[in-house]
Amino acid sequence: MPADPNAPPSVPVPDYRPVERFWPYVDLPEQPGDEELAALSPELSEALFGTPKLPFSVTLEFPRFDAPDFARALEMARASAEYREIGSGDRRRYRARFFPQDAVRLRDLFNIVGRYDATDVLIDDRPVPYARELWLPLMWFLIR
């Protein structure tokens, strides 16, 4: 007897049914957590969520340096309004954000880390021309 041309093809049925979950990804949330959002780079955060509503800020970003006052600089950076460590190993950098009311603490930290060429001064998280020569002295005017 010829097979019916309209009948579906015969498919073998397995003896077991695979689990519909994927092992390493079972417990991952669909939305990023607060720690993940805080760890985003400022550029990526701005691209994803738009410009944050932060007041004017000056950020010092510096690498590890071999000097006796590195521990003091790190302690001062951790006391800033926002502190982050970026990278790992030899490429680790320390980022400390200061707002205008923290001009004294910004100056004190810059007196330690500013003598190194690898120290970056960022204005609102962006490198701008003359940040060391113009913007930092303007911040010093806020010191009373």
Image (cartoon, rainbow, N blue to C red):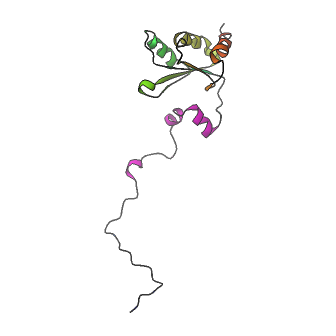
Residue at point 31% right, 69% down?
A: 15
Tell me which corner region of the image, top left, top right, bottom left or bottom right, holds residue 144.
Answer: top right
Residue numbers of the magenta segment: 21-50
Residue at point 45% right, 18% down?
A: 64
Quadrant that contains the N terminus = bottom left
Residue at point 43% right, 9% down?
A: 68
Judge by depth and name the residue closer to the eye, 91 or 46: 91
Please state if 38 lies on the left or on the right of 50 as rendered: left
Q: Residue 120: percent from the left, percent from the top?
A: 56, 20
Furthest-left residue in this view: 15
Please state if 32 lies on the left or on the right of 123 as rendered: left
User: Is 62 one of the magenta-colored residues?
Assistant: no
Furthest-top residue in this view: 144
Furthest-bottom residue in this view: 1
Q: Residue 38: percent from the left, percent from the top?
A: 53, 32
Tell me which corner region of the image, top left, top right, bottom left or bottom right, holds residue 51.
Answer: top right
Q: Residue 117: percent from the left, percent from the top?
A: 54, 16
User: Is 42 one of the magenta-colored residues?
Assistant: yes
Q: How many marks?
A: 0
Q: Residue 10: percent from the left, percent from the top?
A: 39, 78
Tell me which corner region of the image, top left, top right, bottom left or bottom right, holds residue 60.
Answer: top right
Identify whether 22 is placed above or below 9. Answer: above
